[in-house]
Amino acid sequence: MSSNVLRSARSPLKLVSRFSDHFEIGTLHDNFVYAAETFQDYKYLGTRVRVDGTIGEYKWMTYGEAATARSAIGSGLWNHGIQSESCVGLYFINRPEWLIVDHACSAYSYISVPLYDTLGPDAVKYIVNHADIQAIFCVPSTPNTLLSFLSEISSVRLIVVVGRVCEHLPSLPSTSGVEVISY
């Protein structure tokens, strides 16, 4: 079954690559930069706070805070020797850090590659190897899973654990060639 191509009434005959009133915005990265500069103090990403198992109020990150985090992550990857156009794995459930790391990848010319734990460790190994992933961002519950098959994902040079204090990170022998850090 086929259907007609649906287009915006504002541009019925062609694709639009730029906004007519914001010609500087041509990519998602440009759009985020514009939003971060224009709406710096506005709420952007929210997370529900849980206290004693009870869901509470949202804790918000502003566009400006997200832009600062994006720059810290992108420059951190660069400072750890991850070259532009390298693949970076996002091994998260839906959370604000997923989007911020993705923004960092766009800003610093990295390729973001989602890794889904619901597919199981064999799928994660396959994706990491197939994409030649250099760095993986994950939550504190994930490093032990990754470390269990680290010898089978030889492209990985950096594992960044989001939300864990440095002294609780797993240690690896220097011969592994993989650094585990927290953010």
Image (cartoon, grey):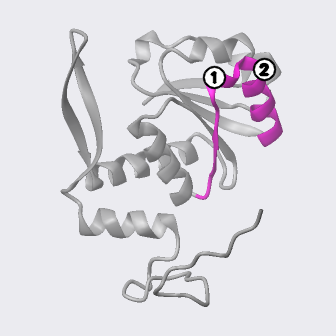
- Is residue 50 on the magenta stretch? no
The numbered mark at residue 122 is 2
Q: Which residues are magenta?
A: 109-131
Q: State the image coordinates of residue 43 (x, y, percent, origin top left).
A: 22, 51
Q: State the image coordinates of residue 182 (x, y, percent, origin top left).
A: 46, 26
> Which quadrant of the structure image shows residue 16?
bottom right
The residue under label 1 is which amino acid type?
A: Thr
Q: State the image coordinates of residue 104 (x, y, percent, origin top left).
A: 49, 51
- SS at circle 1: helix
Q: Main secondary structure of the magenta part?
A: helix
- Pick the front one: 39 or 153: 39
Judge from the rendering whether residue 82 lies leftward or rightward of residue 175; answer left or right: left
Q: Quadrant of the N terminus?
A: bottom right
**Residue 27 seen anywhere in this rendered image of the structure:** yes
Pointer 1 residue:
118
Q: Residue at x 48, y 64 (%)?
A: 29
The residue under label 2 is which amino acid type?
A: Asp
